[in-house]
Amino acid sequence: MTENHDETTRIVEALRELNPQPRKDRWGHLSLCILSATFSISVSYDKVVAPLVRRYATHAGLSSVLLTGDALKPPVSPRSDEQTLSQFLASIEDLDDEAFAEVLDSRHRTSTKSGILKSAAVRQIAQILVEKHGIETLADFAELSADPERTAAVEEDLEAVKGAGQDGIRTGYIWMTAGDDDRVKPDRHVLRWLSTCLGRRVTVAEARVLLKDAAKVLNVTPWSADHAIWEYQARPPK
């Protein structure tokens, strides 16, 4: 038995205990996915990110903010009430990055040393997607994700925005949040769980491979595996 196979087996056994499940909800607008993914890096999701995303949705008067239940069954995009990224940019056009941060009630930065406001990063990401690649909706993203060559070009452009993180973790999380179930986000929770499971330090690149291999054995999506770990680590059972 190879070491890699042995490690996959250990992860599979540990993951089975966490009972990975399919998505039960998702943000209903690409702008909200970008906000969620950008602000989630090194920030509490429950205390900061989810309220922040809803704060912007209220500011913009969005409906279908969080899609659940039957709303997940039909195509979630395009919809008559879906905000395009151009509309998102128009909604903050009269706000500079500082004022946008006030609307979000968050002055978090992409880095404490040389980072920019995350509100600025969100705007830049949306501008790149719209102006350089014509991506407006969740449906546009789904079309993009089916084209590896085009996806690579978009990812290269997004990496230029400060705060991309190790091995493009922010961009991967945007894709994951926007509906790509083959993606994982090896953040500190996931890396800690894998490192504990295997008794060694696990890198972001390794985590992506390990989780995809384990998910395949369990016949679940990589997203489901990632989310089960994240839930266990971030919201441990009492």
Image (tube, helix red, strand yellow):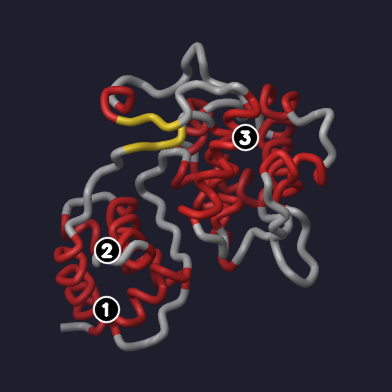
For label 3, the residue is 56
Q: Are marks 2 and 3 in contact (CB under 8 Å)?
A: no
Q: Quadrant of the N terminus?
A: bottom left
For numbered disc 3, what is the local secondary structure? Answer: helix
Left-right relation of 99 to 107: right
For numbered disc 1, what is the local secondary structure? Answer: helix
Q: Position of residue 67 (x, y in %)?
A: 38, 29
- Position of residue 134 relative to residue 104, above or below, is above
**Residue at the image point whose x is 21% and y is 65% from the top:** 15
**Residue at the image point whose x is 27% and y is 28% from the top:** 69
Q: Are marks 1 and 2 in contact (CB under 8 Å)?
A: yes
Q: How far apart are labels 1 and 2 at the CA level?
A: 10 Å
- Position of residue 143 relative to residue 196, above or below, is above
**Residue at the image point whose x is 22% and y is 54% from the top:** 20
Left-right relation of 95 to 76: right
Q: Amino acid at mark 1?
A: Asn
Mark 2 vs mark 3: which is more N-terminal? 3
Name the one closer to the observer, 65 or 126: 65
Name the residue furthest top: 80
Foreground tag (3 vs 1) = 3
Q: How far apart are labels 3 and 1 at the CA level?
A: 44 Å
Q: Position of residue 63 (x, y in %)?
A: 50, 21
Pointer 2 local density, CA inside 10 Å: few below 14, some 14–19, many at least 20: some
